[in-house]
Structures are given as structure tokens and as C-alpha cells.
Amino acid sequence: MVARQLEEQIAGRFPVGQRLRVLDVGMGRGAQALRLARAGHQVTGLERDETLIAAARAALAGEPEGIRARMRIVAGDGRDTGVHFLPGGFDVVLCHGVLMHVEEPDALLAGLARMLAPGGLLSLLVRNGDAPALRPGLSGDWAGALAAFDATAPRPRLPRARTDADGETHARTGPGVRADRLADLTATLAGIGAPLHSWYGVRVFTDTAADGTEPPADLETLLAAEDRAGRTDPYRAVAGLLHLCGVRG
């Protein structure tokens, strides 16, 4: 779903055929980065986890030479983009499944915005802090749902994410991950000069699916339903994940 939404945003902002400079911060195993490199873009993946870097390099090694030439992998922390790259050097910056692991993400977000050229696109995938009780409630965990309602922290911690249908793991292992509220991120994006342009819900109907669940036979119908719900109120507001797209002024 995120790939579809990202393609929609890119097509709506940039001329057809333009080769974009893309930075994928916290690229994981590189699924999204490779997809964009295959589409003809120049992609830089930034990742600090050595195991994930090795997996990304292995995946890249199996690609044709032209794609390998369009993608580079840099070992480093997403909070240190200013150390590795010049400001304004990218047309698109991705940060998917990273903020949930950062206790105070504002500095990270400001650094990402500085990497964007004017008119550049910032794509964030975060845990939805406006619906913390939904997943435990739908799973029959009534105590967990009540605890989520009663949480006083402005950004509650939620169960770790899983691997989605395109094979990208959005959250790494751990006891829990932080979540962000749409209103908070909207204000932050405005403050760093990359105001919110569009947003989607991700995993509206499937956030309670068990780990390792096989895709259904009617996967395309499921994806169509998720796509419709992810762009339709009020459904998108209670999705497990939020995909936010800001544009650098």
C-alpha cells in the first residue's frame, strides 16, 4: 500500500520520466529503495543495523548492473543525515518505520527536511497514536484496550509492527514501539518547512492479522479495500499506521 501511495505522490509532483534523487532513511532490507531504483531513480539508502545492511547489499547484488549503479548504501544513523549529506540534495526523502523507535523525533524530522530540495517530498510511515485501543480491542484483549484508553502519555507505545504485503518490515524487534498523532506531526511538519500535503491510513482492516499470515487468494480485492479505506474518512483515522507526505516550501 505504501508503495502505491508513494508512486501516486511522485507522479503528482514531478514530471514523467524525471530521475529523482531519493534518500531512504532507515531503509531496512531495501525493498522500497530497490523498487525506486528499478524505476530509474538515483537512490541512497541509510541504515545503521548491520544485519539489515547485509540483507540489502545481498538483494542489490542480484540486480542488473544498471540498477546496482543507481543505488548506494550508507551505514549510519538517521539522526546524522547532516554528517553524510549536503542540505537540499534530494528530491524525495523516505522515513518509513523509523520514528516509532526514536524517543524524541523532532530533531530527526528537522534534519530530514533540510535534506530536501525546494518542492521536495518527505514521506513518513508512523504508528498511529490516535487509535491505540483498536488493535487490542479487536483482538479480544479487553484489558489492553482499557489500558490504552487510560494511557496518559501523549504518544503511547504500541505492539511492534509486522512485515507487510510487499515484504518490508516497518518495525524492528522489541517490546513495543512509540506512536505519533496526526495533529502532532502536522504541526511539526509545518514548523520544519515541509507542511503536510497528503496523508493515508495503512492497515485499516488488516492490522490484527497474525504474524506470518499467508496472503489470501483474493489479495487484489483486499488491497483495493485497504486502498479505498486508507484514503477515506473516518476509516483512515483508525488505521494501524499513518503515511504522511509533506512538501518542502
Image (cartoon, grey):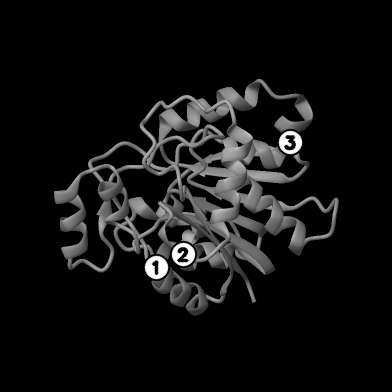
Q: Secondary structure at mark 1?
A: helix
Q: Is residue 120 above or below residue 190?
A: above
Q: Is residue 200 left or right of residue 120?
A: left
Residue found at x 31% / y 48%: 135
Task: Give the labeled residue for mark 2.
Answer: 109
Q: Is residue 219 left or right of residue 26?
A: right
Q: Earlier in the sequence, mark 2 or mark 3?
A: 3
Q: Are marks 2 and 1 in contact (CB under 8 Å)?
A: yes
Please state the horizontal and vertical placement of residue 100, each as a whole percent of the image.
36, 53
In the foreground, 75 or 222: 222
Q: Is residue 235 left or right of residue 173?
A: right
Report the number of discs: 3
In terms of depth relative to the viewer, which is nearer, 136 or 68?
Answer: 136
Mark 2 vs mark 3, CA separation in Å: 27 Å
Residue under label 1? 106
Residue located at (45% from left, 37% from top): 169
Task: Check the picture and name the quadrant holding the C terminus.
Answer: bottom right
Q: Residue at x 42, y 27 (%)?
A: 213
Residue in the image at 66% along x and 20% along y: 62
Sort mark 2 into few (<14), some (14-19) or many (20+) by Cα contacts within 10 Å.
Answer: many
Q: CA distance from mark 2 to mark 1?
A: 5 Å
| 10 left or right, relative to 191 | right
